[in-house]
Amino acid sequence: MAQSAEAPSGLLSELGERLGDRLSLQPSDLERHSRDESHHEPHPPWAVARCQSVEDVQAVMEVCRRHLCPVVPFGAGSGLEGGAIPIRGGVSLDLSGMNRVLRVDQDDLDATVEAGVTLSQLNSGLGPMGLFFPVDPGSDPTLGGMAATRASGTMAVRYGTMAANVLGLKVVLASGEVLATGGRARKSAAGYDLTHLFTGSEGTLGVIVEVTVRVQPLPEVTAAAVCPMPDLRAAVTAVIQTIQLGVPVARIELLDEVMVDAINRFQGLESEVTPTLLLEFQGAPAAVTEQLREVAEVVEARGGRLERRTTPEERSRLWAARHHALYAAKALRPNARTWSTDVCVPVSRLADCLLETKADLEGSRVLAPIVGHVGDGNFHLSFVLQEGRHDQAREAALVHDRLVARALRMGGTCTGEHGVGVGKLSYLRQEHPSGIGVMRQLKAALDPLGILNPGKVLEAPA
Amino acid sequence: MAQSAEAPSGLLSELGERLGDRLSLQPSDLERHSRDESHHEPHPPWAVARCQSVEDVQAVMEVCRRHLCPVVPFGAGSGLEGGAIPIRGGVSLDLSGMNRVLRVDQDDLDATVEAGVTLSQLNSGLGPMGLFFPVDPGSDPTLGGMAATRASGTMAVRYGTMAANVLGLKVVLASGEVLATGGRARKSAAGYDLTHLFTGSEGTLGVIVEVTVRVQPLPEVTAAAVCPMPDLRAAVTAVIQTIQLGVPVARIELLDEVMVDAINRFQGLESEVTPTLLLEFQGAPAAVTEQLREVAEVVEARGGRLERRTTPEERSRLWAARHHALYAAKALRPNARTWSTDVCVPVSRLADCLLETKADLEGSRVLAPIVGHVGDGNFHLSFVLQEGRHDQAREAALVHDRLVARALRMGGTCTGEHGVGVGKLSYLRQEHPSGIGVMRQLKAALDPLGILNPGKVLEAPA
């Protein structure tokens, strides 16, 4: 088990020989690779390896294997559970330089990219071809990072998460071998599903260096709507009914009144301060009109109203406001940082889970606006924590514990889309008491030396 | 490695003690469990264990582990690649008695069933609740079998395969432990994706005893259409365009002219003998009307025509004819059996793959009508082989070899939905040269004694 506090002697010089100036020991690089967007404690790597090719990754793996040195993949550093933090030192394997879109196929609606390609880069390339990639976590991660964390976001209700959109992967294993999983066929019953095994494995089973994804044709028509609702329960009930009716909404998002208020302040808006649904509809013209009408009926029956946002500018403003929610939350208090956590429950339990969580928050001194991908039963708490206020952090940790316990009690999961990283280790054991053993067996089989992102997903063996 | 030709002494008496009259050594039972619907050589088990509970499965596993006895799960026996054939003897673990629908949730649109519940049984229960299960392989398998083989079928183009529709599994491991994977949340980023690992593992990593699936609301409106096309390429091009336009068809199936002729003869129909597309549309009324219009335009632009089939009776007849295609093929020659195989290629290569395959068939003396789930790039050859005509079987094997080689060369897979079983062992190695090693590592980790369905998916180690 790789646990050394310092780089083993000879490691850095050997890496330097193999990588040349693609190996960095610069303090600013080490600092940049010591953290992600989460609240988890930073920890610097011993070195940053800026890989430009599969061969670079293999070279790092080969040297690290001999030195039992941790290998921690790093993409955009936008993770929210510390998955890319080198908590035991080692090499931060920076894949952002592997950023070529290798192919896009307009007939087959798929694309293959190097792991360091960012979501915005992929979509910039796809747009002029009449295509888009429908997994939208709201930040601008790399495709490798999205695959590694099984990311999802606002459009998963319609198009699924990364689990549904990754067709195949290229992975450098701990042994240094290159594994190609999946393929370009839309489906296959050929052997064990290695694509899904590595999707969401957070760099602990191998380093994803290439991703083949499904892409979608840009819809003929897109429409959006904002629905202020009388209360949280009415909002969630409207969501459940919409899903039950089979209305194929592209996005259905919830902001609680605290978050609406935060966005109003941050963006200078004057939206009604009440739980609010944001929706998007995509498809052929008559279908979109029909969907808008169906949802309007559902929303009005629950005492809400549906306001259309038709122009591209209105829609951009709407989704920009949604995507900046975390910054809006942060701006609620001076000298604050945010701790964003997510759980996901069966949709039928979402109203109960949200209301109990709200009550818990209101009985505490913790400020935490809520946003949710409610069509999936997934929601986020963004704890707003001020510098030096350890009392806030302590109380947030207790609220967080109770949040996860509540989600698990309701048949849900400790993380819908952020991953386990270092933040959800103990919860994963609670959620999958029988699965942990199997996960450990798989880890031991594929990474017998324990060099791949140690301390993530699975706790260190006792 | 369990390879004995005869039951180890003591095995059967110990199993009898544990299972009582649920253990059968009756020749008729052994015969029934010696084969599936495939052409693969039957092989009887040493005994049939009719499990009624998870505890029964655990008891069988415990005894078999001590005796290094193969454990071969058996559901409806409807497999097409020999997955349930006890090729090395052992116990046929019959799960058809575990046939309770444990729960259906109309709010969450999911259901949990025991592994022996059949597709028709599940849908009979769901229908009155306004729900249905959208994976439709055409026969009437058990849900356990469908999960174990990663089945799909006609509606995968819209709703995905079993991979997309299984939310969680309960599995009895080789150790006898019960593993619960996944959960009821619509998505999760919590740890390794064990659900997908076991889905499609064909009983070689564990015995699936319970399946939680997504279900769908019955569509408001369903419409169907038959589209006779001038030739195969026109038919496939129309399919590609339909998918590219983003028309959310529920089914889009192809019959070649040989299959249309076979169905005409079998069912006493008079359809035009030409490559034909069968379509189904589901959704809200305006959306379905719009989809019909869009597809009609695409089809007519390629020289075909779209004939609507609107009444429920017309639709039932249409899909019954499709589902009886294998019987229609069999009836083409006297004393014939069929050998049904499937491959799947990127949709862009489908026309080439089909046309090259047709040319190969026409240059041979092999009769093999073609049907395809063409929206996925998946198609089936049904070789019609007459008893005693070893020349036909030999030539079919050569055509089959070339078919798979062609699919792999075009970036496809050796099986889109039937699984590997015993029929695609060597092709799996060709398709996943780098994956085979990892699959073996996973198998060794989870089934170190090699008792779980030995000889399936992965060839015996050299």
Image (cartoon, coloured by chain):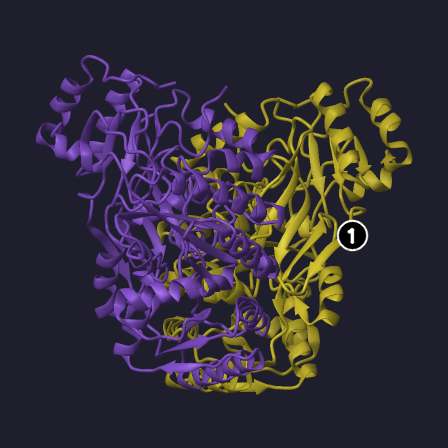
Chain colours: A purple, B yellow
Residue A440 visible in this rendered orientation of the protein: yes
Location of residue A130 with respect to B17 vertically, above or below:
below
State the residue in front, B389 or B193.
B193
Quadrant position of residue B269: bottom right
State the residue in front, A284 or B381.
A284
Q: Position of residue B423 (x, y in %)?
A: 57, 43
At a point 74% along the width and 31% down the height, the residue shown is B58
Location of residue A92 with respect to A356 vertically, above or below:
above
State the residue in front, B192 or A85.
A85
Quarter of the image that includes the N terminus of chain B: top right
Location of residue B16 with respect to A153 vertically, above or below:
above
Q: Position of residue A240 (x, y in %)?
A: 57, 68
Residue type at numbered disc 1: Arg
State the residue in front, A200 or A416.
A416
Q: Position of residue A32 (x, y in %)?
A: 19, 38
Q: Position of residue B221 (x, y in %)?
A: 60, 81
- Mark 1 belongs to which subunit? B
For disc 1, the marked residue is B100
Q: Residues within 10 Å of mark 1 (few under 14, many from 20)?
A: some
Position of B48 with respect to B342 (left or right) is right
At a point 29% along the width and 28% down the height, the residue shown is A71
At a point 21% along the width and 57% down the height, the residue shown is A121
SS for dot 1: loop
Residue B362 visible in this rendered orientation of the protein: no
Location of residue A395 with respect to B319 vertically, above or below:
above
